[in-house]
Structure formats: structure tokens, C-alpha cells
Image (cartoon, grey):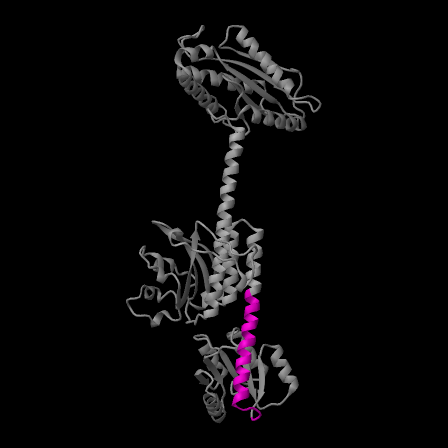
Amino acid sequence: MDITNLKILLIEDEIADADWIGEILIEENCFDLELKHVKRVGEALEILSQDTFDAILLDLSLPDSQGLDSLAQVKQKAPESPIVVLTALNDQNIALQLVRQGAQDYLVKGRFEGELLVRSICYAIERQRTEVTLRQQALMKKMLDHIRQSLDLSDILSSTVAEVRQFLKTDRVLIYRCESGKAGETIAESIDINKLEQSGKMNFIPDITKVFFSNADLPESSYLKAIEDVVALPPSDPYTLAENQIRSILTLPIWRNSSLDYRHESFGLLNNHKTITREKNNDRLWGMLVAHNFSTPRRWLDWEINFLEQLTTQVTIAIQQSELYLQLKDMNEQLERLAILDGLTGIANRRYFDKVLKNEWQRLAREQKFLSLILCDIDYFKLYNDSYGHPAGDRCLQKVTQTIQEVTKRPADLVARYGGEEFAIILPDTNEEGALFIANQISQRLAKLRLPHRKSLICDRITLSMGIATQIPHRDDDPSVLLGIADNALYQAKNQGRNQIVQTVQDQDQKPQS
């Protein structure tokens, strides 16, 4: 057990007992001692709201509080500080109740010497540290499980700040995202609303990020800060600018490294955690983990800082994992787009057309609604390519595509490149009048473009031949039925001189069923 410096709060109303305890602690000379003495629980609670202690020595018979109630009040105010009860009562039942309610030890006045008191204090501190370590491990395991189970970085960061605030018992914890050359932003935070109300800042949540991160030349040594009381800082310190907003603060950097060196095969806890090796040339400050109190000072303990540094390592891994997932997702989406889109025109390809036609056929067969299909063919397009060249032919296909898309605006409509110079348009829930209207609109818009075609045998500009088929799908039929009808109509349009629209409506008498 390595304890060299102790800061102890003694709550004792008997001056003689207080002096005696102070003397025997000094006589033992086991550590550097800072002893703070108060006579009432109320005084102790006020001090504990301003300061932290390694251990608390508590008398049960005080002017303003007695027995178990004294322990409950002090424990609630300082849950992380080990409490050793000092009392004149030699009652095993009371001793057992006190231990169950959070006291680390129970000593009867007049029955212990300095050595026993020192040992009791040291053991109490060690047991408290063990309890804290177990909570650290539980929190770390919870975080690791969350990282494994979730790829949503926002969810992971929100959970992290909430858990850290509960663990530290501090007023606010946030994660600040740094952007190179830009103003950063708070992307996750957890606030103790009760403390915010008590601080009088309910309608004003401090934007402390502007204070610490407004300086683009912030030195690396400033990234990790543990400030017990902002009021005590020299006026030249930039953190004093936040004096009216915060009282104590802890900041830790979250590094983003392009190369992670995983030292262990699996995640471990605390001393066996996954290590990130930071290369100087690859370091990039991704963000900051910030914890602070609104109105009260707080001593940030070394073990708290060490634990949070390990936790930010896991946050870094979560960032890497999330960014990799987003990259893979983006790549998959690009591959999916490449698989369904025509590379030249950017509209659906034949493969995706077949899939959508089948799906719409099945859906509209269930709903008993019309499905229309238009097949378009650019007239004498081979002669156009021969005359103007294939690059010009590609540009022509793109302009025709744009014209068709300007007319087919409904989300369910699909325009696809069906072949070299052929296009197909799927029009769900569209009867024969609606399909004919769309075809005429396409023809009229294309005529207004007046795309030149000097080799056309029917006109001096680009024209389209179109075949339209409309039908209410039957479950027992195949969508190839509709495709065949539209193809036959297109053949008739071309055979009758091109630059025409031929429409075939199958089963003219059938109407949508209500």
C-alpha cells in the first residue's frame, strides 16, 4: 500500500478528542498529513461541496446530527471518500449497520492507539480504491460491450458522457469535436440538471468550448488540464475567462491516428487494455473529453485521470471503427449504385429495370391498379453516330435522358436505359391517358431542344419513336407480357415511319377494382 500524502477531514465536536486524534496521527509519522477539523455535520457538508478528501473521520454524536443520519448525510455528499466512524458507543449492531450503509470501519474511542487508527485509515482508503477499481472495470466493460455492439458513433459518445458524468459525480461532461481550420462543436454532453438549477444557470448552459478552443495555436501541453479551482488561476490564464461559467475543469485529448497498433488480440480491462501507439507524424487531435463543475471546486485525482485516459483510448477505437464502417457503407452504396445505374446516362440500367418491373407488377397485381410501360428509341441513331462521332452520340443520349427525366417526376416512376439507344419508362398506377400524356410531353420537350440530326431520313433533328402498353397486372401472368406488348407497339411506330407514338391497351374493358 503506497500512501505518502493524506488529506483528512475530521468531524468531531469534542476539542479534546480532536486534539488527541491529531496528535496521534502526527506521532505515527507515516505520511504527510493535511488535517481539516470541523465540529458539525453542516460545516462538513459545506466544506465537502468545495473540496475532496482522501478519508473522513466521523463522530456519531454531534450537535446537529446523530447516529446513522450523520453517516448518510456525509456519504451522500462525498460518495467517493472512505469514512471511518469514531464513537464512544461499543455496539456491534450499530457497527454492522454503519458498515452496511457505507462506513469502511468502526472504532471505539479510548480503545485504539495511533497505530490502529493509521492502519484503519489506510485500509479504509485501500478498500475504497478497490471498490472504485471494480466500478472502473464495470464501466470499462460496459463501454467495450457498447463499442462492440454498436457502430453508431453518436450513440457511443452519448453513452460515454452519461456514464463518465455518473462515475465522476460531476456537473457536466461533454465531448468537443475539433475541426482543422474551423470552429468545433459539442457533439455529445450530459448535464446534472439539479446542479445546473442550483448554479443559477438554468437558462444559460456555459459554452466553455469557445474559451479553451478559440486559440488555434493551443499548445499540446494544454490539451490535458486538471484545474481544481479556476478562481485560483493567474489573470493571464485563458481559463480565467470562464470563471463566471465554470469553477473546476478536467480536459483530456482524444487523438485520431491513421495507424493503430493493436498490442493485444482482444480487449482487456484497465491494465490489459488495447493500446494505441501514437506516431508523431500521424497524430491529429480529433476532439476533447471535458468534465467540469459549474459552481464548486473539485480536486481531480490521479487515478481518475489515468482511468479517463484509458477510456479515451477506447473512444478512439470506437471512432476508428465507426469511420471504417461509414467508409465501407459508402463504398457498398457506390457499388450498389454502379450495379443498378447506367454509367453513361446515370439512370437505371437494364438489370435494375427488370427488378423494378417485376416488383411493380406484383404490387399492382395485389392492388389491382394500372401499370404503364413506355419504350423509346432514338430514330436513326446509328446514322447519327456515323455522322457526328461516338462522343457526340454519348452527349446526345445524355440530353435525351435529361429530357425524359424532366417529364417523369413522380418518385415511383423509373427511367432506364434499355439498350444502346433505347429507353424504358415504368409508370406505376398510371392509366392509358396518363401514359399517353407523358409520351407526348417527352416528344414536345425533345422537339423544343432541336438537337440537330442531318442524317435522319425523316427530320433534321433528333426524334423518338415510342410504344406504350397499359395493363392491370394479373398474378398468374409475367411482366414480360407487358414488355412484349410495349415492344410490339414500338415496332409498329418505327414501321409506320418513326417519330410516332403507338399505344396498345390490353383488356380495354377492365377497370381497377375498388
User: Is residue 457 depicted above or below 80 in this figure?
Assistant: above
- Whole-percent x and y of residue 206? 39, 61
- Whole-percent x and y of residue 335? 52, 34
Q: Of helix, strand and loop, which mostly describes the magenta segment? A: helix
User: Is residue 293 depicted above or below 113 in this figure?
Assistant: above
- Which residue sits at x=54%, y=30%? 339
Q: Is residue 362 left or right of residue 85?
A: right
Q: Is residue 488 left or right of residue 233?
A: right
| Residue 264 can be seen in this image | yes
Asked if the stretch drawn in magenta spans residue 209, the answer is: no
Asked if the stretch drawn in magenta spans residue 120, the answer is: yes
- Whole-percent x and y of residue 385? 43, 13
The residue range painted magenta reads: 110-136
| Closer-to-camera residue (231/385) | 385
- Which residue sits at x=47%, y=66%? 306
| Residue 170 can be seen in this image | no
Q: Is residue 402 left or right of residue 241?
A: right
- Which residue sits at x=48%, y=11%? 379
